[in-house]
Image (tube, grey):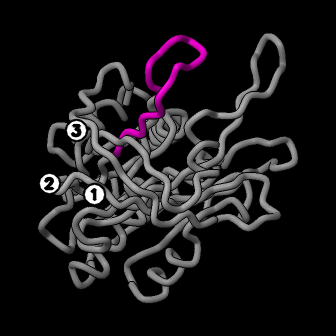
Amino acid sequence: MKLEDLELGPHFRARLVGNEALTPPEARAEVRELTLELSEDGFTFSIGQSVAVLLAGPHDFGQSHHVRLYSIASTPAETGPGRITICVRRCHYVDPYSGERYRGIASNHLCDLPVGSELVLAGPVGLPFVVPDDPTAPLLMVGLGTGVAPFRALLRHIFEERGGWQGKVRLFHGARVGLESVYRERIADYQSQASGFEAVEVLSSRPAWDDPADLSAAIARHEAEVWALLEDPAVHVYIAGLTPVAEAFEEALAGLAGGREAWARRKADLVADGRWMELLY
């Protein structure tokens, strides 16, 4: 999802009413859950959509606003009208030429923001996740890091708001190490209560080297089941998070399909049927 390609819609104000840590203090990565109360009475959203956070400038490159998108981690029924929850990871960037380390503008601002502060938002942004009417349809979800945020909402919707799900539900989630993996307890609760749900925690195979979560290895360990799901004519596939995660996922699936061309044909069928959904940054 490229910012320059998106129509952000009207701007409105929001007040921060909650800012809680999702990772423990000893974790190297800091992830926080922010709850926002919106001034826009008519704001409506669906699972799988995002909001844009606009920070007034001037900024380093002269832009009037610094804009970042964040997936909505709550459902409309959960927070009620006028409230949303987002998941924010504190980011830093290293200049490839100078080697200097810089704070991410939006993420650090949001993580440090005290309750009661106001923000400017726009949205909702992007297409929603389509949830099948048939509760026996299998669902395959992939969301590493804060990419799990929309799946927090999707799992709540199917298991609590719709009264359960009879089809197989598989979620690949995780982070570099377990301490950085968010919503673990909530996901474990759903797994203990829903017989058809299995969550696979994806971690780095070399965390000391700062390697990311190894999705390819996790898919390889579950390759038979993953491919069986993808061949099911009712399966719905959802991917959220950073673009490299989707690229790793598709590379693994190409291996299962017997090559990139075979996988491209299978994916084209899923896309044409509206059963392949992405929320990527």
Can residue 102 be seen here?
yes
* Disc number placed over residue 47 in the picture, else none: 1
Q: Is residue 143 left or right of residue 204?
A: left
Q: Is residue 279 left or right of residue 205?
A: left
> Up-down: is 2 above or below 138?
above
Location of residue 102 in the rendering, given as x and y in whole percent from the top left corner? 74, 28
- Judged from the image, the secondary structure of the residue bearing numbered disc 3 is helix
> Sequence order check: which comes first, mark 1 or mark 3?
1
Label 1 neighbour load within 10 Å: few <14, some 14-19, many 20+: many
How far separated are the C-alphas under marks 1 and 3?
18 Å
Q: Is residue 247 left or right of residue 164?
A: right
> Up-down: is 62 above or below 238?
above
For the point 30% across and 37% down, the residue is 267
Q: Please say whether residue 61 is one of the residues in the magenta stretch.
A: yes
What span is in magenta? 51-66
Q: Which of 213/222 is in front?
A: 213
Q: Which of 79/119 is in front?
A: 119
- Judged from the image, the secondary structure of the residue bearing numbered disc 2 is loop
Quarter of the N terminus within the rendering: top left
Q: Please say whether residue 255 is one of the residues in the magenta stretch.
A: no
> Sequence order check: which comes first, mark 1 or mark 2?
2
The residue that label 3 is drawn on is 271
How far separated are the C-alphas under marks 2 and 3?
31 Å
Location of residue 104 in the rendering, given as x and y in whole percent from the top left corner? 64, 34
